[in-house]
Image (cartoon, rainbow, N blue to C red):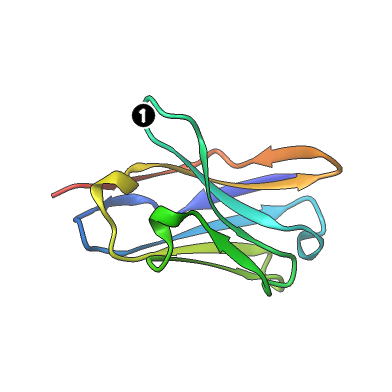
């Protein structure tokens, strides 16, 4: 199982970024996917979740209405579109899946929101 995130960077407040996560080594379409983030000195937290077919999504309250999770099962990709970014969104963002009770994580991609 391999998850590789990309798309992070430095952006000004109010800006946008689109994170991508490329999955391999498992039947991607059979598993739900999640995005987490971890800010310095804080615990890793769930940001968003998407079911296998993409029909159900969920977001934590601080990002609701600003972030959109999506997936392309044909390409084994999951995305996180982040709009109206705020300094408090600064964190390292990780994608994750759970297979047979075991969590698999990518290496993360850094998002920094600063003027």
Residue shown at the point (58%, 62%) measured from the top left: 58
Residue occupying the far right of the picture: 100
- Give the residue displayed 55% in from the left and 38% down from the top: 107
Looking at this view, name the residue that lies furthest to the top. 41
Residue at the far front: name it: 61
Q: In front here: 52 or 2? A: 52
Compare residues 13 and 72 and report the one nearer the observer.
13
- Above or below residue 43? Residue 62 is below
Counting from the top left corner in percent of width and height, residue 77 is at: 62, 63
- Is residue 7 in view from this perspective? no
Can you name the residue that lies furthest to the left here? 115
Image quadrant assignment for residue 11: bottom left
| 84 displayed left or right of 100 | left
Q: How many other residues sit within 10 Å of disc 1, few (<14), some (14-19) or many (≥20)?
A: few
Label 1 secondary element? loop
Name which residue lies at 50% across and 41% down.
Answer: 108
Which quadrant of the structure image shows residue 51?
Answer: bottom right
92 sits left or right of 23 in the view: left
Q: Is residue 42 visible?
A: yes
39 left or right, relative to 58 = left
- Name above or below for residue 4 compared with residue 85: above
**Residue 44 position in % (x across, y down):** 51, 35
Quick check: 100 left or right of 23? right
Identify the residue at image location x=28%, y=64%: 84
Where does residue 40 sit, x and y in percent of width and height? Answer: 36, 29
* Quadrant in the picture for the N terminus: top right
Residue placed under numbered mark 1 in the picture: 40
Q: What percent of the width, then of the height, locates residue 46?
A: 54, 46
How many marks overall? 1
């Amino acid at each position: 199982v391999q998850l590789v995130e990309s798309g992070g960077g430095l952006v000004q407040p109010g800006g946008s970024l689109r994170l991508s996560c490329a999955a391999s080594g498992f039947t991607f379409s059979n598993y739900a996917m999640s995005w987490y983030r971890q800010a310095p000195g804080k615990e890793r937290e769930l940001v968003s979740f998407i079911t296998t077919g993409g029909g159900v999504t969920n977001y934590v309250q601080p990002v609701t209405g600003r972030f959109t999770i999506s997936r392309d099962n044909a390409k084994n990709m999951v995305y996180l579109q982040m709009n109206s970014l705020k300094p408090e969104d600064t964190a390292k963002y990780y994608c994750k899946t759970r297979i047979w009770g075991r969590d698999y994580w990518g290496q993360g991609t850094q998002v920094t929101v600063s003027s």
